[in-house]
Amino acid sequence: MKIPMLHKTLVIFYIVFLVGGNLNAQSKDMPLTYGVRAGMANPVLTWDYQPSTLNRFSPIIGGFVQYQFLPWISASFDILYTQYGGNSYNPLSLYPQTSPLLTNLQFSNLKINTLETPIQAKFGIPSLDGPIKPYASLGCSFAFFLKAKSYNYYLNTLTTSNPIWYSATDNVTSSLKAYDFSGISAVGIDFANENINFSVELFYRLGLTQINANKKNYAPEYRISTIGLKFGVGI
């Protein structure tokens, strides 16, 4: 029986969570926090860093480890399942001009399943003490593309007087690079007590990698940028 990729990813997160918990239990004196994250992203494909597609809403789920260097400086490492892509993208960026899949094609949506590893440095306010701590962060993210699908929507006007809409899903993983590198900036708030920590973060991820596997002279090369919201629970 095949296990869906999302289920495999969740198993990895569970193992990381258990290992992190064991390490934390053995090292209570270390300023180490681990936990889970979840949220929602709103990615778009960009051309020359300008939005070129409609937004799509994508889930974020995973785990994190955070190390506190000073009361107001920390670093975090996440492992997240998330989705990239955009709605109503230019299909010529992935398909050749002679592809029969372009016949009667009206619009296409792109969804890329990824395993993402953001690394961020977090800076709080040195003079601020208490359980509520606002912060800003900077960092980078490496995303590995697991699978990419194009959802193509067609309008057939040849067989009947009434137009017929139909759709088809195409696996376009091989048309994209296997990875993406992005810069990340964020603002957020940590809510901390002795036993459990909560956080909420608004982030912006700027795509720096052109995702097309092959350069095309007749179509733009896209990058992926995202704005999103993440919630964290740590111990």
Image: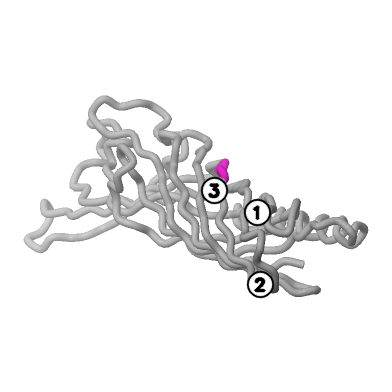
Amino acid of disc 2 = Phe
What amino acid type should be assigned to the residue bearing mark 1?
A: Thr
Q: Where is residue 225 in the image (x, y as percent from the top left)?
A: 41, 48
Work out whether residue 192 can be spotted: yes
Ranked by sequence position, the earlier of labels 2 and 1 is: 1
The residue wearing badge 1 is 9
Amino acid type at image mark 3: Thr
Distance between mark 2 and mark 3 Cα atoms = 29 Å
Circle 1 sits in a helix, a strand or a loop, which is it? helix
Q: Is residue 92 above or below residue 127?
A: above
Between discs 3 and 1, the one toward the N terminus = 1
Residue 66 position in % (x across, y down): 72, 55
Q: What segment carries the magenta color?
A: 139-143
Q: State the quadrant of the C terminus.
A: bottom right
Which of these two is toward me, 201 or 149? 201
On screen, residue 117 versus residue 59, left or right, reads right
Residue 191 disc label: 2
Q: 11 or 132, which is in the foreground?
A: 132
Q: In which quarter of the image is residue 80?
A: bottom right
Q: In the displayed structure, does residue 30 sit left or right of residue 130? A: right
Q: Mark 3 points at which residue?
A: 114
In x, y percent, where is residue 96?
Answer: 28, 31
Residue 144 spot, x, y in % from top left: 56, 41
Quadrant assignment for the N terminus = bottom right
- Could you tell whether 192 is left or right of 171 in the image? right
* Label 2 to label 1: alpha-carbon separation: 28 Å
182 vs 185: above or below: above
Q: Measured along the vertical axis of the image, is residue 177 above or below residue 157?
A: above
Q: Is residue 141 magenta?
A: yes
